[in-house]
Image (cartoon, rainbow, N blue to C red):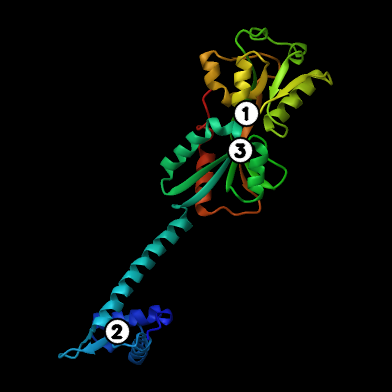
């Protein structure tokens, strides 16, 4: 009974060399071994398969038996598989292939699909997957190593990350075109503080920025806020006249162009921030991850909406 699990590449290569050269001596020369070593490999393979694999032809050269031909076919398939594997390993090590997960905060959903499309065109053999969530979710993904890279507006304190600015991230206050503050030049702090602000959930980077801005201009004056779950809901509520909102300019470019929203002029606006590309400080990116990281960095924000 054959013991295929004990067959080695050395034995298969010895069989191939004996058939290709026709002799033990020729095989030994090809493989840099001695003829007895080749003979030992061949005998061991025949013992494992419980079958003769070579016979001598009339002219003295070795030729394969039917069993030997079956083994040579397997050896050829293994050689092709190993060569393919070696090329794939080399590609993975060079970063020319691989899989990379990119996490983007929900405010970035207006440019993230375009960014991934650009990456796939530039790096066609690298599979870039996109995960979009709120700030808390993206931080959790980084902490769990569920994403390789992340893009957000304010780097977290934990986990420790390496953050590189990759483009401007301005924030504006938007209102409906018929809102009393739409034509203000500028809107005064007391005017803004008298309005109802529509904001994202607690922990949102935009909400944190809004809170700091209003506390600064109000110097302790209370202000009204209504919490809403998404930027889309906030935009529609502002258009409907339910309030105004401090929001990323990249989320309202189309509404501003079409005139459905207007940017309120006020001292301190727009608030200039940056988008950051993050990777964990304690984790080394794969070669493919480094290629994606460097490509995003070198784009210098060209993937962002033009405002």
**Residue appearing at x 31%, y 87% in the figure:** 51
Gap between marks 1 and 3 measured at Cα: 11 Å
In the rendered image, which quarter is residue 263 located in?
top right
Secondary structure under tag 3 reads strand
Left or right: 54 in relation to 307: left
| Position above or below: 17 against 264 | below
**Percent position of residue 126, x then y:** 45, 48
In the rendered image, which quarter is residue 264 located in?
top right
Left or right: 222 in relation to 140: right
Dots 3, 2 in contact, CB < 8 A: no
**Residue appearing at x 49%, y 51% in the figure:** 99
**Percent position of residue 248, x then y:** 62, 26
View extreme (bottom): residue: 36
In the rendered image, which quarter is residue 1 located in?
bottom left
| Position above or below: 65 against 264 | below
Crowding at dot 2, Cα within 10 Å, few <14 / some 14-19 / many 20+, comes out as: many
View extreme (right): residue: 220
Sequence order check: which comes first, mark 1 or mark 2? 2
User: What residue does disc 1 label?
Assistant: 230
Gap between marks 3 and 2 measured at Cα: 62 Å
Sequence order check: which comes first, mark 1 or mark 3? 3
Gap between marks 1 and 2 measured at Cα: 72 Å
**Residue appearing at x 50%, y 42% in the figure:** 295
User: What residue does disc 3 label?
Assistant: 133
User: What residue does disc 2 label?
Assistant: 27
How many marks the image carries: the answer is 3
Secondary structure under tag 2 reads helix
Q: Which is more foreground, mark 3 or mark 2?
A: 3
Sequence order check: which comes first, mark 3 or mark 2? 2
**Percent position of residue 253, x then y:** 54, 21
């Amino acid at each position: 009974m054959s013991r295929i699990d004990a067959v080695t590449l050395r034995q298969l290569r010895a069989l191939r060399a004996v058939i290709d050269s026709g002799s033990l001596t020729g095989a030994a020369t090809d493989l840099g071994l001695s003829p007895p070593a080749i003979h030992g490999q061949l005998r061991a393979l025949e013992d494992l398969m419980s079958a003769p694999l070579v016979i001598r032809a009339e002219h003295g050269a070795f030729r394969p038996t039917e069993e030997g031909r079956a083994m040579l076919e397997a050896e050829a398939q293994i050689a092709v598989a190993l060569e393919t594997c070696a090329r794939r390993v080399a590609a993975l090590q060079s970063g020319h292939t691989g899989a990379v997960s990119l996490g983007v905060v929900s405010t970035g959903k207006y440019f993230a699909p375009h960014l991934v499309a650009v990456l796939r065109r530039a790096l066609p053999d690298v599979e870039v997957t996109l995960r979009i969530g709120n700030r808390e979710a993206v931080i959790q993904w980084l902490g769990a190593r569920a994403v390789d890279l992340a893009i957000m507006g304010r780097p977290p304190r934990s986990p420790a990350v390496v953050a590189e600015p990759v483009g401007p991230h301005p924030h504006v206050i938007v209102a409906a075109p018929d809102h009393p503050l739409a034509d203000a030049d500028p809107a005064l702090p007391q005017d803004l503080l008298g309005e109802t602000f529509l904001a994202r959930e607690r922990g949102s980077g935009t909400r944190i920025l809004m809170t700091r801005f209003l506390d600064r201009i109000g110097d302790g004056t209370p202000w009204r806020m209504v919490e809403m779950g998404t930027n889309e809901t906030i935009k529609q509520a502002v258009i409907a006249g339910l309030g105004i909102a401090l929001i990323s300019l990249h989320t309202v470019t189309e509404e501003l162009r079409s005139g459905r929203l207007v940017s309120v002029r006020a001292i301190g606006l727009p608030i200039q921030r940056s988008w950051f590309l993050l990777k964990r400080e304690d984790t080394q990116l794969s070669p493919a991850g480094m290629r994606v990281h460097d490509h995003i960095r070198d784009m210098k924000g060209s993937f962002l909406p033009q405002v």
